[in-house]
Image (cartoon, rainbow, N blue to C red):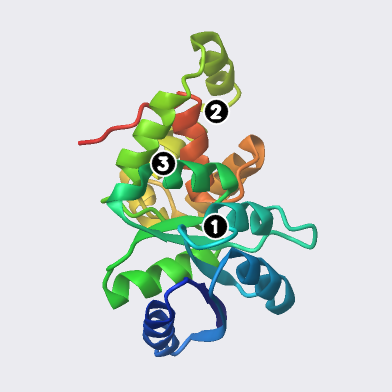
Amino acid sequence: MIRVMVADDQKIVRSGIAVVVGAADDIEVVGEAKDGYEAVEFARELRPDVVLMDIRMPGRDGIEATRLLSADPDGAIPVLVLTTFDLDDYVFGALEAGAAGFLLKGADEETLIAAIRSVASGSGTLDQRLTRRVIAEFAARRPTPQKRRDELASALTGRELEILELLCEGLSNQEMATRLFIEPSTVKYHVAGLLAKIGARDRLQAVVWAFQNGVVAPSIE
């Protein structure tokens, strides 16, 4: 059972999300928080598998709460950030804070539940309508010198670079296996090795790393 906590300053939103995700057979809503202070306090007490985090909340916002939970001394607590297109600056901050996934508010039930499962499994999640554009701008604002980009790329094998590029396209293990004509288990092995080598916790952070360091050029098409 995936244990989920919902953090949002609007009670009707919290309740609505709790009803939707709690209806899934494999998800249990274990707590709700109305601001970033409660989000951190309750998450540390309840240790949920995923925290659904609003970015803009009174007092401590979702970015600071995400940073604290991602760096929790007892182990990172995965955060799935819920956001909208007009909050780009907040999203940049959440990326740096270590969010495990992003999803647009208003996503349908199936998409939301799939995102929760993905984050809970350690894969992270990328909303293709949002994340590619946001990370492209995120990378553009923080350019890495060419020499450093070359050094980072040279530390990866050719296969790892291929895997990283496909991760940046948002492909699943099965889709990558089909593209590369290898077994899904082999893809899983390379993904795990890649994450360990670059120090990324999950796929989303690997994509951030790739774009931020210029190892993969982001596409916003």
Question: Label 1 to label 2, Cα distance in Å?
Answer: 39 Å
Residue 157: give its label.
2
Q: Is residue 136 visible?
A: yes
Task: Please tell me which of labels 1 and 3 falls first in the chain.
Answer: 1
Q: Residue at x 59, y 62 (%)?
A: 78
Q: CA distance from mark 3 to mark 2?
A: 34 Å
Secondary structure at badge 2 equals loop
Residue 175's disc is none
| Image spot of residue 89 (x, y percent) | 41, 41
Q: Residues within 10 Å of mark 2 (few under 14, many from 20)?
A: few
Residue bearing mark 1: 61
| Residue with the mark numbered 3 | 89
Q: Nearer the viewer, residue 40 or 177?
A: 40
Q: Which one is nearer the viewer's eye here, 154 or 68?
A: 68
Are the residues flagged by discs 3 and 2 in contact, CB closer than 8 Å?
A: no
Q: Amino acid at mark 2?
A: Thr
- Amino acid under disc 1: Asp
Picture mark count: 3
Judged by depth in the image, the label closer to the viewer, 1 or 2, is 1
Cα gap from disc 1 to disc 3, whole angstroms: 13 Å
Q: Earlier in the sequence, mark 3 or mark 2?
A: 3
- Left or right, 65 with respect to 136, comes to right
Work out whether 80 lies above or below 212.
below
Q: In percent of the image, x 58 and y 16: which residue is there?
A: 151
